Image (tube, rainbow, N blue to C red):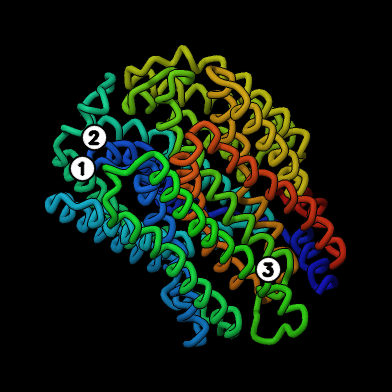
Amino acid sequence: MATEQKNNLSNTENTSMIPTNYGALGTLVTVFFFWGFIAAGNSVFIPFCKHYFNLDQFQSQLIDFAFYTAYYIGALALFAYGSFGGKDLVGKWGYKRSIVYGLLFSALGAAAMIIAVNANTFAGMLVGLFIVALGFSLQQTAAQPFAISLGDPATGTSRVNLGGGINSFGTTIGPIVVAFALFGTTAAITDEQIAALSLSKVIILYSCVGALFIGAAAMFYFSKKVPAGILLEKTEKANKALYTLLIMTGLLIIMFVPVFNSYKTDMSQASEAENHAMNSYRMKWLLGALAVVVVGLLASNMSAKKNADGWGAMKYPQLVLGMLAIFVYVGVEVAIGSNLSELMKLESFGGLQSSEAAPYISMYWGSLMIGRWAGAVSAFNLSKNTKLILQVIVPLVAFGVIVGVNTIAKYDMEPLLYYIVCVIIQIVAFFISNNKPARTLMIFGFLGILAMVIGTQTTGTIATYAFLSGGLFCSIMWPCIFTLSIAGLGKYTTQGSAFLIMMILGGGIIPPIQGKLADVIGIHQSYWIPVICFAYLTFFAIAVKSILKNQGIDYDNAAATGGH
């Protein structure tokens, strides 16, 4: 296996440069924009629904639960089809058709949202978001390997980073556009005014979103520049992995049912002690859901070490630990942003109304754009010195774009101007990491820990900047985790990629856990959850480097020469 990996790396380095299909790449990155726009828009949609439907913090986080759980269910369904049928459905359809079908499915989700709004039901809106994200799951499964296939494999990660940069542009303007669509103004309005707003604004919003999905599908379908991307390779069965994932899914359902059922009990007249006991009860079941994922994956890998037959890609420790890393990464990325609006309501954080938090949410998601734009520089055929210069200039330009967009929207950005200090720290860290995935993940994981600890121990501007900088340190973690997790997998690479996409599930479990912890100990101290998440990501960076070395793979050096 190690020899095979070394040969592959050598071949990558000696192969003549394959020209990038920029026409197809330009069309492809539009779907990356949608993922970011909708996901970040949820950060504003959450407080809107919380006040409109009179929800607690956990209930409001069910928006993220529905959205990100759909990624898991969608990816699991695709894997199950491939395992039973012996063919990869995405490969059979081709990348192009898969993305078209995914966009149309998301359009159906937008239609479901409109129906649910007309019925004035929060549960129906969750179903609509679930369907939207199911479409995203299909798009994501196809788009990531598609981006890599549109040019030299050595620069594939950079093209994914470019898509991530466009995704982050969507996350930057998403909160602003959604806030304006829901609140009808960029001026501050009270939570009481939010509760009195008409849901007709949501109908208009998702009518536009649905139309955009259909328009993008048409653009893909009729574009002659986008290749079909059909792959007819047989998929190797991994029945043990499939059955394990199905059992984990069943256990997750069991863990969440008591939590949902507990909300049928009227606690409006309950004492403080009774409310605390109920919240503790719910918290135990939520932690049980987390344990199902962690224990299930680790037990699978231990079993695979004894007998690898039937486990497929899950017999590789770097992949299993990477699945947990993707789970944690998506979870922490979403949890920080989704709980931010509630945090900013505290007097120690400015006492802002939900509508006033929009620029802070935009800056958080925009922080991911800053790092990803810098990482995308390598996707273009530029000289070494030009790349170095751009890796300094591009993050600063990205920061300026975020400030500019919010200024145009008439938000007061003066409190956020000094956030550029955090951006400079990120630039320095980027150069120290030297485009080496394990080192990058280790450095940025440590900075994430430091930022969250500072945030939990302080208040005001320092704490706000610390929590916002979580976006900076998350910004380039995804390609690092992905690269390290599939290193050395050989013929199991595609299957391993599918398993990693499943773990976007973390965005549906970790934010509700933080939301419920916020109900128990307060929103400020609930940010110890991100501390734990960043700690695991740092551990993964250290552990996976050692694992790969034992397999004869020096992936840091390979990635550096291959154009990570």
Q: CA distance from mark 2 to mark 1?
A: 6 Å
Residue drawn at (57%, 85%) of the image? 239
Label 2: few (<14), some (14–19) or many (≥20) C-alpha neighbours in 10 Å: many
Rounded to the nearest angstrom, the CA distance separating label 1 from label 3 is 42 Å
Q: Mark 2: which secondary structure? A: helix
Q: Are marks 2 and 1 in contact (CB under 8 Å)?
A: yes
At label 3, the amino acid type is: Leu
Q: Residue at x 54, y 81 (%)?
A: 243
Quote the CA–CA distance across marks 2 and 3: 43 Å
Count neighbours of disc 3 (C-alpha within 10 A) and say few if under 14, some if 14 to 19, many if 20 or more. some
**Left or right for 380, reference 334:** right
Instruction: Name the residue type under label 2.
Output: Leu
Does 432 sit left or right of 370 as displayed? right
Q: Residue at point 69% right, 61% down?
A: 321
Determine whether label 1 and label 3 are within 8 Å by CB: no
Quadrant (top left, top right, bottom left, bottom right) of the N terminus: bottom right
Q: Circle 3 sits in a helix, a strand or a loop, which is it?
A: helix
Which numbered marker is on residue 202?
1
Q: x and y percent of residue 81 in the render?
A: 45, 81
Q: Secondary structure at mark 1?
A: helix
| Comparing labels 2 and 3, the label whose residue is closer to the camera | 3
Kind of residue sitting beneath label 1? Val
- What residue is pinned by disc 2? 182
Indicate left or right for 181 with 245 as reference: left
Residue 219 visible from this viewpoint:
no
Q: How many marks?
A: 3
